[in-house]
Image (cartoon, rainbow, N blue to C red):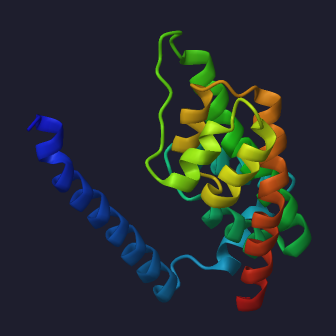
């Protein structure tokens, strides 16, 4: 048994613990009122025309470190309202999936071996990247939304950037719309 195989269960427990801590802190901050939709909205409005720019930069930066993109879509709806929130969530989402792809493409080595998923449905979509790249991207983004590791993995593969962006753009529109609509029910 390799060292990586021995530490795998501990890494999974550590990641699970970090997720639980993140959720607990988020719930605590929300319940205590330290951060609320109105306080975030007021802060972004105080920035004037820079508010949307700051939001987009936060979305892209958060995506680069693995924060969930749907949290930013919900945040856009809460902070900017339904219409501007949808636009910022969609544009931010497209930037957030494009930046890791472009970064990985720029830094990749020619001999880098593309990552292959273990899940059957996702693996089938990966297999179609060469023959039906737009359709494969639509399936992947409908299943994995704003997942940055997938962006990095796809950058190592054969897909062209334009097919990556087109498929992602088609798939993320209903994802962002659903997040925007669902958030509207709770506001």
Q: Quadrant of the N terminus?
A: top left
Outermost residue to the top: 110
Q: Nearer the viewer, residue 38 or 125?
A: 125
Going 77% across and 56% down the picture, which residue do you hit?
172
Going 77% across and 37% down the picture, which residue do you hit?
132
Q: Nearer the viewer, residue 113 or 146?
A: 113
Task: Report x, y in % for residue 124.
Answer: 60, 46
Residue 116 visible somewhere in the drawing: yes
Residue 53 visible somewhere in the drawing: no
Going 51% across and 53% down the picture, which residue do you hit?
120
Going 84% across and 65% down the picture, which residue do you hit?
86
Q: Nearer the viewer, residue 90 or 88?
A: 90
Task: Report x, y in % for residue 185.
Answer: 76, 90
Task: Report x, y in % for residue 84.
Answer: 89, 65
Please give left or right for residue 3 compared with residue 142 in the image: left
When asked about the image quadrant of residue 101, the answer is top right
Task: Report x, y in % for residue 123.
Answer: 54, 46
Q: Nearer the viewer, residue 67 or 168?
A: 168
When asked about the image quadrant of residue 155, the answer is top right
Outermost residue to the right: 83
């Amino acid at each position: 048994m390799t060292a990586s195989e021995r530490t795998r269960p501990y890494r999974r427990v550590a990641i699970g613990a970090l997720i639980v801590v993140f959720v607990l802190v988020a719930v605590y901050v929300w319940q205590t009122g330290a951060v609320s939709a109105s306080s975030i909205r007021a802060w972004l409005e105080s920035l004037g025309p820079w508010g949307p720019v700051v939001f987009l930069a936060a979305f892209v930066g958060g995506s680069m470190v693995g924060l969930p993109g749907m949290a930013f879509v919900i945040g856009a709806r809460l902070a900017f309202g339904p219409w501007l929130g949808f636009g910022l969530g969609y544009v931010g989402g497209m930037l957030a999936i494009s930046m890791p792809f472009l970064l990985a493409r720029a830094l990749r080595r020619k001999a880098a071996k593309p990552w292959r998923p273990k899940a059957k449905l996702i693996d089938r979509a990966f297999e179609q990247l060469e023959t039906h790249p737009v359709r494969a991207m639509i399936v992947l983004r409908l299943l994995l939304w704003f997942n940055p590791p997938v962006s990095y993995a796809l950058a190592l593969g054969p897909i062209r950037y334009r097919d990556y962006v087109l498929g992602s753009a088609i798939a993320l529109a209903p994802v962002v719309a659903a997040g925007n609509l669902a958030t509207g029910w709770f506001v």
